[in-house]
Image: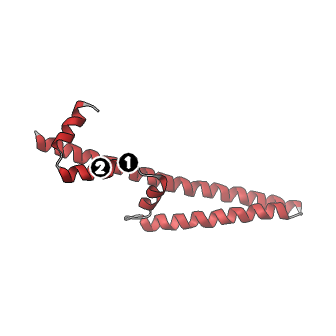
Amino acid sequence: MTEIDNRIRDLLDADDKEFLGELEADRGMWRQVGDSLTGPMGGWAKLIFGLAIVFGLLLVFCFYKIFTVHEPFEHSMWAISALAVLVVQGFIKEWFWARMNMLTVLREVKRLQVQVALLREGK
């Protein structure tokens, strides 16, 4: 730890230490997913999560059809459909991961705001 970190910890009262301890706790992937399903954009995140499941099932169906059809043209169309669904699935997952990363950055910014405010009060 640096000297500034030690000074900040010395200035914190019990409530602030508890709050910062909660912010600094290691958050696993499932907790981050749960956090991204709440808040002002929680409805959109739930919709996107549901769409990801639907497109995942659609992708499984496309692969099933690729292996069960015998006509070459139909086989090609199911393969192209599977590729298109895979691309859409990738975009959906990218949006969801970007949201999780944004919430992590906001959490860190909030932690820094608390530390700076406490440092300013201590001077």
Identify the residue at image location x=74%, y=63%. Answer: 62
**Residue 80 disc label:** none
Residue type, numbered disc 1: Val
Q: Which badge, 1 or 2, is on the more N-terminal residue?
A: 2
117 shown above or below 5: below
Please indicate, yes or no, whether residue 59 appears anywhere in the rendered image: yes
Q: In which quarter of the image is the N terminus?
A: top left
**Side (left or right) of 30 relative to 76:** left
Name the foreground residue: 6 vs 42: 6
Residue 26 pos. (x, y %): 40, 48
Residue 66 pos. (x, y %): 80, 61
Identify the residue at image location x=47%, y=51%. Answer: 98
Residue 29 pos. (x, y %): 48, 53
Q: Which residue carries the number 2 mark?
A: 21
3 shown above or below 15: above
**Side (left or right) of 6 relative to 64:** left
Secondary structure, mark 2, is helix
**Residue 105 disc label:** 1
Crowding at mark 2 (Cα within 10 Å: few <14, some 14-19, many 20+): few
Crowding at mark 1 (Cα within 10 Å: few <14, some 14-19, many 20+): few
Distance between mark 1 and mark 2 Cα atoms: 17 Å
Residue type, numbered disc 2: Gly
| Mark 1 vs 2: CB contact within 8 A | no
Identify the residue at image location x=57%, y=55%. Answer: 91
